[in-house]
Image (cartoon, rainbow, N blue to C red):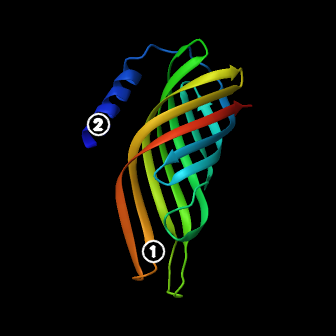
Amino acid sequence: MKTILLIFSSLIFCWTSFAQEVAETSKMSHGIELGSAFSYSGFNANLAYAMGWKENVLFVGPKISLSKSYLPSRGPWGIHLGYRRLLPRQSKWNSFASLEYQIAFLQPQNPYNLDINGKNEIHEIHLSYGIQFEVLKDLIIGNSIGAGVYFERFFDSLTGEKKSFDGYNAQVRLFAQYSF
């Protein structure tokens, strides 16, 4: 998996480095983005503020888990942060490389009334490649697929200990972005 991630990262770097220049825009754009993704933490939806300049897009906002976690917990909220680098444009189609970070906060269930500090957390980092389509002048839809890592920190209510897992995962994401 490390070899695949290294090759994927190298290809994305080469594509962005050797790409032809895109016509420069002098203004910064702002908008909202509604997205849905499937990754290690399950099905998630996010609503984000998006800020774009030249060939760059930065987005940040809350996310909510739409699927039940295998951990006994409550509270499916989190944060989704991402950076998207647009590659040369072909008509209304545009490809991009992105780096995304997600964290989900889950309130651990505590059937034995143990002293619990903090929440269960699932951190995810993904490197993705995707394509987007300009439906209208200010509305785009897109999708991406990527690979990454996860770090899970949770409270085990049977043993009373804080435990952690980590590993590799994948993400498939769909989104719609409207610029003001």
Give the amino acid at mark 2.
Ile
Q: Secondary structure at mark 1?
A: strand
Circle nearer the N terminus (2, 1): 2
x then y, percent, for residue 49: 66, 42
Q: Quadrant of the C terminus?
A: top right
* Residue 3 circle label: none
Please report the residue visible at 61 percent of the width from the left and 36 percent of the height from the top. Answer: 175
Please report the residue visible at 49 percent of the width from the left and 55 percent of the height from the top. Answer: 41
x then y, percent, for residue 32: 69, 38
Nearest the viewer among 148 and 41 is 41
Label 1 crowding class (10 Å Cα cut-off): few <14, some 14-19, many 20+? Answer: many
Location of residue 127 by image quarter: top left
Label 2 crowding class (10 Å Cα cut-off): few <14, some 14-19, many 20+? Answer: few
- Position of 180 with respect to 168 (left or right) is right
Please, is residue 104 above or below residue 35 in the view? below
Please, is residue 71 above or below residue 157 in the view? above
Please report the residue visible at 51 percent of the width from the left and 87 percent of the height from the top. Answer: 112
Q: Which residue is mark 2?
A: 4
Q: Quadrant of the N terminus?
A: top left
x then y, percent, for residue 103: 51, 56
- Position of 23 with respect to 34 (left or right) is left
Q: Which residue is mark 1?
A: 155
Q: Secondary structure at mark 2?
A: helix
Location of residue 156 by image quarter: bottom left
Query: Distance of mark 2 from mark 1, alpha carbons?
Result: 32 Å
- Position of 4 with respect to 83 (left or right) is left
x then y, percent, for residue 163: 38, 71
Do labels 2 and 1 touch, CB within 8 Å?
no
Please, is residue 17 above or below residue 119 in the view? above
Give the amino acid at mark 1.
Phe
Nearest the viewer among 87 and 3 is 3
As drawn, the residue found furthest toward the right would be 180
